[in-house]
Image (cartoon, helix red, strand yellow):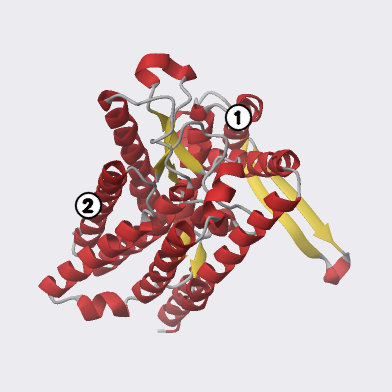
Amino acid sequence: MSEAEQVPASASEAAAAVLDALNATDSNGTEALNATAKFVATTEGTALAYGSLVFMALLPIFFGALRSVNCSKSKNAGDMPETITSRDAARFPIIASCTLFGLYLFFKIFSQEYINLLLSVYFFVLGVLALSHTMSPLMCRIFPASVPNKQFQLLFTQGSGESKEEIVNYEFDTKNLVCLLISSVVGVWYLLKKHWIANNLFGLAFALNGVELLHLNNVSTGCILLGGLFVYDVFWVFGTNVMVTVAKSFEAPIKLVFPQDLLERGLEASNFAMLGLGDIVIPGIFIALLLRFDVSLKKNSRTYFYSSFLAYIFGLGLTIFVMHTFKHAQPALLYLVPACVGFPVIVALFKGELTEMFRYEESSPEEAGAKEDSSESEKKDQ
């Protein structure tokens, strides 16, 4: 997390995979320009900016975690979560580091303008799809019953006869088309104006979809992932200038921003505090896992979810406090990881459920479906 005089870039990488981009885009990689900035934020403006960032960070974690519970039970191919295994978690900091350093070399060798143009188009497509998916449940509730909801299917195959293979098989309806249209308007607005509100709409959609659709298979995997990214974040922020360079050059809606001069300049404000989506999504998928663990206990209690959620608020608040005190950008995962892992572990020790928590294994939708089919067949046989 950091303060910046201008926001010409996001705080990190985005290349290979969306998760890679989300984690590597920590805004804590940007330089704190307080000492040389021409604009000095007022106390009210700073408090409003940081408070708004915290509030916006909590929204995708809370609602994404709730949606992840339904997502884990979904049989719709379009809503299937991506399960992260312990091997994926161990490799991810290395992949993220390679991507970050690769972007650093790209910005050093090639024109920043053309690279950001390609990235803008890339994230325009991803942003429209992510925002459309985010809006879909709301649209289902408010869509007028008098308007016919027609069903469509986009099917693209390869080969013929028995060797025919499906490449794309996407089912959608009129509601989805309306969501896509609204999202496209926001996308065009972002492409043309790069306005901070459009940036935040896409950023919130990315974060919510990440928390909803990226699932850790167990708590141990979550600890491996968060531990590895803890080291990654600290090293690239404090050990080199790579993340800072990429952050200053990179333009994409993969951070949340809020102006500190909003009270003085209104919607045309340009001095932003920012938070990278990696600081939201990475702890968020761990918090969502703990919510699904709460559900699996069948005790009508959300103890682990609320304890980790409060821990996230504490960790983010501590990040802001340290950054504001020392006037220097901070790697937020340095504070978020110990808080989000430590608080639930302490609660599990107190309740005597630590072993049960670490033994919890989440099945993939395919495995869960297979188990349901086998149980149904067993009942029929009986």
Q: Residues within 10 Å of mark 2 (few under 14, many from 20)?
A: some
Residue 241: image x %, image y %? 53, 55
Q: Secondary structure at mark 2?
A: helix
Residue designated by label 1: 190
Name the foreground residue: 62 vs 110: 110
The answer to which quarter of the image holds residue 225 is: bottom left
Contact check, label 1 and label 2, Cβ < 8 Å? no
Is 342 placed left or right of 251 in the picture? left
96 relative to 328, above or below: below
In which quadrant is the C terminus drawn? bottom left
Q: CA distance from mark 1 to mark 2?
A: 33 Å
Q: Quadrant of residue 356?
A: bottom left
Q: List x then y, in percent, for residue 51.
A: 29, 35
Q: Which of the pair 183/78 is nearer the observer?
A: 183
Q: Secondary structure at mark 1?
A: helix
Q: Position of residue 224 (x, y in %)?
A: 40, 74
For label 2, the residue is 310
The kind of residue tagged 2 is Leu
Among all residues in the image, which is located at the extreme right?
160
Q: Going by the picture, which residue comes out furthest to the front? A: 36
Q: Residue at the location (19% across, 60% down)?
A: 303
Q: Is any part of residue 136 visible from this angle?
A: no
Residue occupying image coordinates x 57% and y 33%: 179
The mark nearer the N terminus, 1 or 2, is 1
Find residue 321 and report its horizontal and vertical position in percent: 25, 45
Q: Is residue 227 above or below residue 110?
A: below
Residue nearer the viewer, 117 or 223: 117
| Residue ID at (61%, 43%) | 249
Mark 1 Cα shell of 10 Å, populated few (<14), some (14-19), many (≥20): many
Please tell me whether residue 253 is drawn above or below residue 223 in the rendered image. above
Q: Amino acid at mark 1?
A: Tyr
